Amino acid sequence: MSATLAPPVRIGKAAVGALGLLAVATGALESVVTPTLPLLQRELDMSPAEGALLSVVLLVTGALVTPVAGKFGDRYGGKRVLIRLMAVVCAGGLVSALAPNLPLLLLGQVLQGAMVGALPLSFILVREHLPEGESKVAIGVVSGLFVGGGMAGTLAAGPVAEGLSRHWMFALPTIAVIGATVLVNRLMPHDAPSRSDDAGVDWPGLVLLSGTLVTLMLLLAMAPDMGSQPLVLGALVVVLGAFVTGWTAVERRAASPMVDLRMLARPQVWQSCVLTFVICVGTSVAVYLVPQLFAVPAGEYGFGAGATEIGFFLLPGAVAASLAGPLGGIGARRFGSRAVVVAGTGLMVVALIALAAVHTEIWHLVIGKAMIALANGLCVTAMVTSTATSVDRSDTGIATSLVLVARVVGYAVGAQVSGAILTAGTPSGSDVPAESAFVTGFVIAGAVTALSLLVTRNVSKGPKE
């Protein structure tokens, strides 16, 4: 009998903890650019367009790598692919840390974007080595720690960049990623490939998917200036449509498609993708608008907070985000995924509408942001765990990667919409947006999030234990 047919080795808390540490470290490394973008623009003499490019290039790479990593993890084994992926991420972090100019920093961010593929690979390992009930909780822990790491990176990046240098804000989380990768390599047993096929890699599908996502991200990045460039907008829409059409045709005919469209057509998978996208749009609006509102001069209607103060104000949100993952996993296990998603969505809608109505005190924003972070973590974790346990083990990586791509695109869309709203709401000759622009953003985010309740009605309740 082949050794690959032996029962998988059950992992302990130490191995799950190593995956959690890796999630924290990669989440922190992913998030350091956003709060320090003004500083980077000053030090590297970047134009606003170059700053926008820097802010989205990691998301573009992550959206490209995630489905590929999930597919390869299903095919060749999660640990093998995860370790190699982290080697690329570590190289990217070191390049970013040492970069003396914008081109090298962009290269480092492109390499760092591979980190987004670590989550579906972690889910493959958890499902392989734990029974279903425990795997839901473990997936929730890893997801929550990734979100918490991102919030921690957002909090620490400004003080580190201002107190040490911009180089150290990349170097410190990269060192943590290296250490966590070594721990995962030592503590996590090897998993056998879940499938064996000789169809090779679907390179045409990969190229067309890459073109689709790059064009979409470019369209979003340029959206605020599209009013003055209608021909460019039309051209990008046509190119995006061509890529989507070509990719769909190729994937339908491929012997071993990079993304199996039949899987995407499953109700559990497409509903999870739609819900994750909508919820992350609402979340990213708050992620973008709340710090901007903190920074509005006190003489206007804001609080005149600096980078360090803003980080302190966002700390409760970081704590809530870290707790949301494990709570979402436990909730999905005990009450079913639909109950967790409905509760989280309702909490987010209430928080967004409350921020639109009341934002005159710092504690209003602190509590509202914490509620949104908690709600987002609950919903996304429930969607990921529901998707991961609704497909065959051999499809765990690619199925969860589709949900995570929806998360990345949702955040990008929400951020760009928020930026466009503030730009449109800034009076001529002023650098401060009108207060009504913030109100509009929160109301739109709340309304869009509320629409997701229409989808949750059809979501499977999921198994309860």
Image (cartoon, helix red, strand yellow):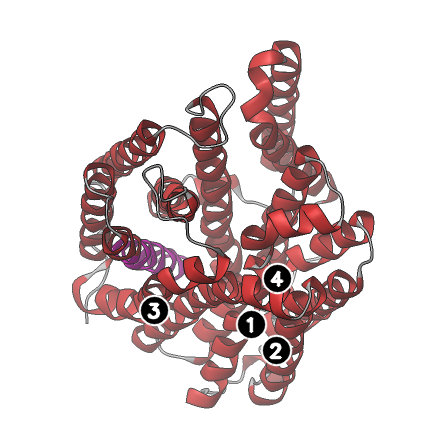
Q: Which residue is mark 3?
A: 319
Q: In the drawing, what numbered circle is on residue 176?
A: 2
Q: Quadrant of residue 339?
A: bottom left
Q: CA distance from mark 1 to mark 4?
A: 10 Å
Coordinates of residue 199 in the picture (x, y in percent): 71, 51
The 10 Å Cα crowd at callout 1, few under 14, some 14 to 19, many 20 or more, is: many
Say which label, 3 or 2, has the lower sequence index.
Answer: 2
User: Against 273, is 179 above or below?
Assistant: below
The amino acid type, in three-letter code, at marker 4 is Met
Question: Identity of the amino acid at label 2?
Answer: Ala
Please tell me which residue is depicted at 19% across the width and 72% down the height of the picture. 465
Magenta stretch: give its range.
Answer: 370-393
Residues at marks 1 and 2 touching, judged by CB atoms closer than 8 Å: yes
The location of residue 432, given as percent across then percent down, is 45, 32
Residue at mark 3 to residue at mark 2: CA–CA distance: 20 Å
Residue 115: image tag: 4
407 relative position to 440: left or right: right
Measured from the top left, where is residue 388 in percent x and y? 40, 60
